Every structure is written in C-alpha cells, then in structure tokens.
Amino acid sequence: MRILIVEDDHKLASNLQNLLKDEGYVAHVEHDGLKAWETAYVENYNLIILDINLPGMDGLTVLKNLRADQVDTPIILLTARNNTDDKVQGLDSGADDYLPKPFATPELLARVRALMRRNTNVNSAVINVGNITVNTSSHEVSVGKELISLTPREYSILELLLLNMDRVVSRLSIAEHVWDDNFDLMTNVVDVHIRNLRKKLKDNDKNNQLISTVWGIGYIIKNTAEA
Amino acid sequence: MIKLIKVRITIFGIVIVFVLFMTFGIFIYLGLESLLQNQFDRRLYLQADTIEDSYVHAEGKFKFLEPGTKNYDQAKNKRVRVVQNTGDVLFESEYFQEREIPFPFEKANQRKDKKYFYYSYQRGEDRFYRSIVIPVVDPQTQEVLSWVEVSDSKRYIEASLSYFRKLLLASLPLVLIGVAAASFYVVNRLIRPVSLMAQRAEKITSENLNSRVPVINPRDEVGRLGITFNQLLKRLEDAFRQQQQLLSNISHELKTPLTILRTHWEAEISNTRLPQATREKLVGDIEELARLSKMVDDLSLLSRSMEDLTNLNKAKLDLSELLGNLVHDMEMLAEAKEQTLVWQNGSALYVNGDQRYLKRLFLNLLDNAIKYTPQGGQVSVNCSVNGNTAQIEISDSGIGIPVSDQPHIFERFYRAKNTKYGATKGSGLGLTIAKWIVEAHGGTLAIQSGTGKGSTFVATLPLFLS
C-alpha cells in the first residue's frame, strides 16, 4: 500500500510518514504542490493525503488537475480551515474525504483504512474479529451467526476501534469521532457507550475481552488472528 | 432637564427676546412718560407765563384777565387762579370756584428764588392733576405780589401711557411666538444634519462598521464633525478588521503545530515500551491539546465577521427534533452526574437555521447547564411559540449567576466569580459563541438568574415563515 503525503510543514509530514510506516504502509512525502502533481501523475499510489495550503500550487488545484488527468486515486484533503465552503469545494472537486486540522491520529487512520478498503474489493468491506463480523459498507454487525442492532453511535465507536486495530484509541479521540463539537464534555459518556456496546456484543469475558480497557488511556481492539 | 437641543435653544431664545423686549419697552415707556410730562409742563408754563406777562404794574391789573375780554372768557373756562400774597383770591376760573383746592402758600413762600414751580395733587382715587405757580414780582421792590396758578388734569398723559402699555403687552406674545417659530426653524435646520448623523451612527455596530454618516455641507462645522466622525469610523473599522485578521491568522497558524504535537503524542500512547504513567500523562496532555484546538477553533469562528454569515447553510429545520436528539445525547451525561434532564416535547417548531450551528448553540447551553448544576440537580429544556418567535428555555438548578456578573457572561473568557464546578473546563468561549450563533440567526439570548436560584437561558429565534 503506497501513500503520498503532500504537506508543506516538514515536521508534520514526517510525523505522518512515521505514523503510516508504523501501520505498514509505504509513505512518500512531497512539500510542493507542483511537484506533488507530477509525482502523483507519474507514480502509482493507493491513497494521497493532500494539504490545501501548499507552495507551488495549492491543494485544490492539484486535486482538480489530477482528476482532470484521470488519476482517480482516493484523496483525503487536509486543511487548517474549518470552513464549510472549503469542505464543499473540496468534495466537489473530487476529494474522497476531508479532515480539518488539528486532527486526531485514530481519526486519520480510520479514514485512511476506510478509503483503502472501499477501493480494493467488496470482501474487504467485512472485518472479522473473534466471533464478531462487521460489514463496513452495510453497517451490519453480527455476533456469531446472530445479527445484532447497534445505535449509530455505538456502531461508529466500534468501527473506529476496528479501523485502529491494535492501537490504543483514547476516550477523547472516540468522543471527537462520534460528536463533532463539545467532545470535552462527552468523554464521560464514552465509557457508558462502551459498556452498552460490550453488553450487545456479549463481550463479557474479562480474560478475553474484544474491547479491552487500557487504564487511564482508552480502549483497544486487538487482532485475535495474530495473537 | 429638557433633552432636545432645539427645544433648549428655542426656550433660550424666547427668554432672551423677552428680556430684551421688556427692557426696551420699559426704556421707551419711561422716555415717553418723561416726554409727555415735559410737553404737559411746557403747556402749563406757556399759559401761566402769558397771564403773568400781562400784569401791568402801574395799574396793578392783569390785562389778560380784564372781565369782558375774550381772554377772560377763555381763562374762566380753564383752570386758572391768581392769588395775592395776602391770601386773597384775585381771579378764579369756574373750576376753582366749584372745588375746594387749597393754594400751596407754604410751598410758594419757601421759594426764595422767586421762580415758578410745579406741584401735583390728587382728587379722589384716580384723578391726578398738576399745576404751575408763577410768582408776580414787583420790579422795584422785588417783592412777590401775587401768584398765577394754571392747572390741568394728567388724564391725557395717563391715557397715552396706558395705550402704549397695552400696545406693548399685546405685541409681546406675537413677538415671542415669532421668535420661537423662527429660532425653532433655524435651529432645526442647523441640527438636522446632526440628527441624521446620530440616526445613522446609532445603526452602526461591529457588523457594519463600513457604513458612514451622511455629510450635508462638508465646509460648515457640522459637516466637519461628520467628516471627523467618518475618519474615526474608518480607523475603528481598520482596527477591528485588523483584530479579526490577527485572530484569524493566529488560529490558522496554530493549527499545524497543534496537529504536529497531537500526531506525535498519539503515536506514543500506543507505545507499550513507555511506562504506563508516562502514557497516562500523554493522554492528559492530548486532552489539553484538544482543548487548545477547540479554543483556536472557537476563536476563529468568533473572528469571522457578520459578512461571513452568508456562509451559514440556513434551511427549514425542526427545532423540536433537534433539541429532542440533543437531549437524548446528553441524558447519559446527566445520568453520570445523577441529574434529571427534563424535556418537554412539543409539536414541531420550524426555524430557518444552520443545523450545525444551532446544534452547537444548544450543546453549549446544555453543557453549561449540566456543568454548573451539582450532583442530583435538574436541568430542563422548554420550547414554546411566542408570536413570530420560538422560545427555548434551558434552566438548571445550579448555583446561579450573581446579578453583577450577568452583563459579562457573554464576554470572551469571562467566568462568574462564584464558579466552583469545572472552573477550568471548556474554552471559556461557549456562551460567547452561543450568543453569536443566536444573533447570526436574527434572535436574542437572555439570562435570568440569581445566586442560589439556578439559571435560565432563553434563546429567542424567529420562526420559519413560508
């Protein structure tokens, strides 16, 4: 899996590069918009993470040019502006997702994984962990053979944890993911949601829990296949 | 105190004109009185002098008063008498014959200079008379032989003066009305540009600092005031814009470093090689980073001017539904604090609003209510229609906000002094943003509270009109 990171801030770019490398991706970095356009056109990437404010050529133009060049690599736009106009313009220009800065790492990874899955094959839309099966396109969750119903928030939390498999997700990141605003207030509620989620998933075995608590930090779903 | 300057100036004008008019009137009156008096005295003198001149010393007779002559008849009809120094009356016209008017011997004898003099006397209540007395002096002995007195009623003087007084008093109101009308008109004309400026200036808020007051005549004093005021507005607008620009730039520039820190530290919390305590600290720091990010977001939201409000994606939406969903979300949170969250579900309430911002608004208010209500308290949400507006009341049973703090609670980073709960939580911009959102939707946000009585926030939003 090859990812191109286009970000003019060297430090942030290398942070993202390291993060994605840790996750097993091959990540390249470009700092200049014009160069990024050339690279993305010539090389073959599975995903592009594109900042809007760039020297050489701004991100939106890079995006439009690439789409005009028939490059249909999924693109996640990064921008400092939390502005609905930019968002709409970005998505209209052919971006697949949009992430305002500053963003949480689990959020970025979840979106990267979701896009990767969507753009490979249909089977990869289904995630299996233990006896739990989650279909990320139909949002269906089953325990064993039995289909269970989750509230949209519970599903959203489960999906975030699954897309960040083997990585601790802080309560803050969960709260931010589920509620757009006022997450500082909502971190307490995350525990309640997790409790309900465990109940529905019949995830009661303290020794072999699917969603495990990392004390003082957050929650994690471990890949049982590897363990 | 009379507030309007044109009324004040008009009254001032009336007072000044009244005083001037009265002074002038009294002056003229006194002048006229003295003139009439002089004329009167002069006439008396001429008459008396004619008689005195007609005295023939050799004969000891007044030629003028010889019975049978035309002059004699004339004198008879007037008020004339001649009294000898012995006290005998030499001649008396009918007037004196009929009335008891004593001759002023005492006064006449006192006149050592042997010159004529005047005296006044009164008969009845309101009849005033004046006489002239001319001594007839023997040219050899210089002795006073007799006195010639000519008298007349002062009625004509009185009548003239009284006529003049009436004229004066009758014209006074006319003059005053004229002055009042003229000064009101003139002042009004002078003041009108100022009034126009004031009207326009009143409408200038931080949202339309680009508007200017009208300048009618740029060369006069009022026009110069207008120009100066406009220059001031320009500077204010520039300063305000710069402040917003600065705020916007700061929040923009802060986002990349915040992202760097966040991605950096978040990568470490999954790092099991780090001690648990360090990872917990990192989580705490990330929460602080998130709070900082939120503050930056809030600041950049507040730095937008009202011109940017066209960016609001307004659409017809049901407030009742929005609130119901929010309350449902918050219930869990209230439960965690053992609070009761009461929601009076009403019928659909349509407003024209941006869902994202309205959600933010009520989240901020509910957040606030839950935060400042102790364990076991109650928070209630009420929706009602009031005329053309939807009223949403969010009440809590918390510590309340002292009256002295209430005017400030919508200011950025303001915290009431009696804050005990969660004093350090939140960005300190929640209520500022709430107010901003309500006003961006053409509504108002008010607070009713008192220490220990809990607080009620009332958001009033215009209803959606098809």
Image: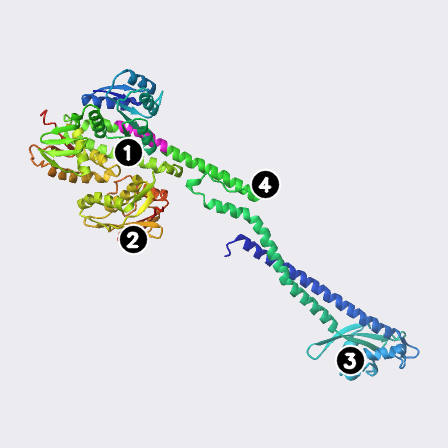
Place residue A164 in its image quadrant: top left
Callouts 2 and 4 in the same chain: yes
Image point 55% across, 53% down: which residue?
Answer: B6
Q: Nearer the viewer, mark 3 or mark 1?
A: 1
Q: Earlier in the sequence, mark 2 or mark 4?
A: 4
Looking at the rendered structure, whether the residues under marks 4 and 3 are on a common chain is answered as: yes
| Upstream in sequence: badge 3 or badge 2 | 3
Residue to which mark 2 is pinned: B450
Mark 2 surroundings within 10 Å by alpha-carbon count, few (fewer than 14), some (14 through 19), many (20 or more): some
Q: Chain of mark 1?
A: B
* Residue B103 marker: 3
Vertical placement of residue B259 versus B130, above or below: above
The reply to whether callout 3 and callout 1 are in contact (CB within 8 Å) is no
- Residue B89, numbered label: none
Q: Is residue B297 visible?
A: yes
Mark 1 or mark 2: which is in front? 1
Residue nearest the observer in this picture, B129 or B157: B157
Give the residue type that dot 1 points to.
Answer: Ser
Q: Is residue B253 magenta?
A: yes
Q: Amino acid at mark 2?
A: Gly
The image shows a total of numbered marks equal to 4
Q: Marks 3 and 2, Cα distance to the nearest angstrom?
A: 95 Å
Secondary structure beneath label 2: loop
Main SS class of the magenta portion in the image? helix
Q: In terms of depth relative to the viewer, which is nearer, A114 or B338?
A: A114
Label 1 secondary element: helix
Q: Which mark is residue B219?
A: 4
Residue at disc 3, secondary structure: loop
Residue B333, x across and y down, in percent = 20, 43
Above or below, A81 relative to A28: below
What SS does tag 4 mark?
Answer: loop
